[in-house]
Image (cartoon, rainbow, N blue to C red):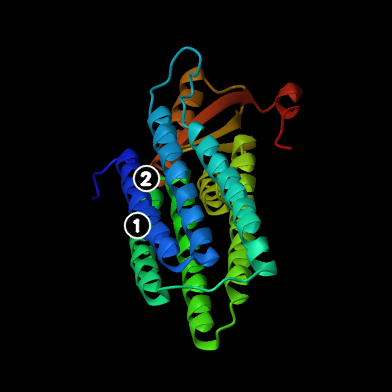
Amino acid sequence: MQNKSARYYGFLSIGAALLTITLKLGAYLLTNSVGFLSDSLESGVNLVAAIGAVWALTYAAKPPDEEHTFGHSKAEYFSSGFEGALILVAAVSIAIAAIPRLLNPQSLEQLSFGLVLSVVASAINGITALILLQAGKRLRSITLRADAHHLLTDVWTSVGVILGLLLVSVTGWLILDPLIALLVAANIVWTGVKLIQESGSALLDASIPLEERQMIDKILSHYDRHQVQFHAIRTRMAGTKKFVSFHILVSGNWSIQQGHDLCEEVETAISKALPHVNVFTHLEPLEDPKSWTDQDL
């Protein structure tokens, strides 16, 4: 699967969501458990989010045009933010279904069959999540990573539901069923809030990861000498793309060719260390006071 595109994994997520919804809804219909209902609602969110992810990945892959000269890669952040919002909606839906059961617990039926279906659904989600997580890291896709983390949250949610309902079958405490559903709702709220925060930060041009910024600083330090200095170093991310810009200050006595050669050398060094980063440089004379008015904030 090394050569598969991000969209391929988006369609894989859709297929997994359809299958797990069927299994979890079957578990709910067999058992009448609001815990299983909450689990199936979260899988419904997975499906809508996966469809949104395929749209975002398709749109983000479009080449630059006159209106979007830097490309469309930020579309991925809308997908992850949308997924976070859907998770919050699912949490509210789960709470609405669980609270009446908390006040009026109901008996459960065919619990063993429901548990088997839930275990199978969890295994599917777990395998899909691991595949998406690896692909997201390899393709540098926040959409695939968000989808993977959501699926992993779904797996742990399902594990909690399964363990709780096993406890119900052993103790006969029916009130545990709606309590489990409310715990599921609280857990996925946290996931949704984190996704929304991450997307919002990225849309505000968040910097590249610290370790990559440190690599750039290390490369620049090799060139930093009496007649060469750097400032106004700025970085940002846009989906799978990352951008770095900085000013190179050299002696005003240098020729245009000397300055150009240095810029090319520095840009090449950074591009080799971080192949996925787009590098922009601006050459300025050291002696001009105006060159120092736009240093990094």
Residue at position x 55%, y 49% from top?
Answer: 209
Image mark for residue 139: 2
- Where residue 289 appears, as percent x and y from the top left, is 76, 24
Observer able to see residue 227? no
Amino acid under disc 2: Leu
Q: Residue at x 55, y 23 (%)?
A: 254
Where residue 170 appears, as percent x and y from the top left, is 50, 87
- In this rendering, the answer to whether 107 lies above or below 63 is below
Determine which quarter of the picture holds residue 232: top right
Question: Residue at (58%, 38%) from the top-left corner?
Answer: 235
Quick one: 129 or 2, which is closer to the camera? Answer: 129
x, y (%) of residue 127?
33, 62
Q: Which mark is residue 152?
A: none
Label 2 or label 1, whichever comes before in sequence order:
1
Residue 204 visible, this angle: yes
Residue pictured at 63% horizontal, 40% vertical? 200
Mark number, residue 128: 1
- Which quarter of the picture shows residue 110? bottom left
Amino acid marked by disc 1? Thr
